[in-house]
Image (spheres, grey):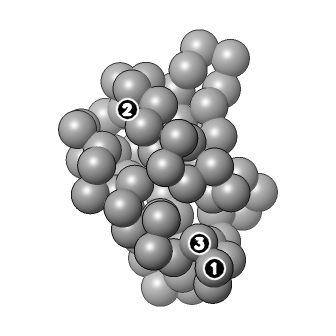
């Protein structure tokens, strides 16, 4: 599974990085980015899904790897 952040939708709320810091990071302006290549580790799948559900702008999607 991979995480993808649509930078055009992100409004820098930062909740994704709070919920799932192993997958999401914030850039110097506070906008979300994926860590590494976006691969979601098996132990972070539940928190990555929670981050997707909590994103107020629906800027995050999870795709099959």
Marker disc for residue 10: 2
Residue 35: x percent and y percent?
71, 52
Using the rendered image of the protein, determine whether residue 34 is visible from the camera's viewpoint: no
Which quarter of the rendering shows the N terminus? Answer: bottom right
Residue to which mark 3 is pinned? 44
Residue 41: x percent and y percent?
67, 77
Asked whether the beta carbons under mark 1 and mark 3 sit within 8 Å of each other, the answer is: yes
Note whether 42 is above or below 27 in the view shown: below
Counting the numbered discs, the total is 3
Residue to which mark 1 is pinned? 43
Residue 34 vs residue 45: left or right? right
Query: Between disc 2 and disc 3, whose residue precedes?
Result: 2
- Secondary structure at numbered mark 2: loop
- Tell me the mark number nearer the camera, choosing from 2 and 3: 3
Which quarter of the rendering shows the C terminus? Answer: bottom right
Residue 34: x percent and y percent?
62, 50
Note whether 29 is above or below 39 in the view shown: above
Note whether 36 is above or below 30 in the view shown: below
Residue 2 vs residue 43: left or right? left
Note whether 13 is above or below 33 in the view shown: above
- Secondary structure at numbered mark 1: helix
Front residue of 42/9: it is 42
The residue under the point 55% across, 20% down is: 30
The residue under the point 65% across, 71% down is: 39
Would you call the spot at circle 3 few (<14 residues within 10 Å), some (14-19), or many (20 or more)?
some
Query: Between disc 2 and disc 1, whose residue precedes?
Result: 2
Real-space Cα separation, disc 1 to disc 3, in angstroms = 4 Å
Would you call the spot at circle 2 few (<14 residues within 10 Å), some (14-19), or many (20 or more)?
some
- Tell me the mark number nearer the camera, choosing from 2 and 1: 1
Residue 51: x percent and y percent?
40, 54
């Amino acid at each position: 599974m991979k995480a993808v952040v649509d930078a055009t939708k992100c409004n820098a709320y930062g909740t994704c990085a709070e919920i799932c810091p192993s997958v999401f990071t914030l850039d110097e302006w506070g906008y979300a980015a994926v860590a590494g290549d976006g691969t979601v580790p098996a132990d972070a799948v539940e928190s990555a899904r929670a981050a997707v559900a909590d994103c107020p702008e629906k800027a995050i999607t999870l795709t099959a790897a």
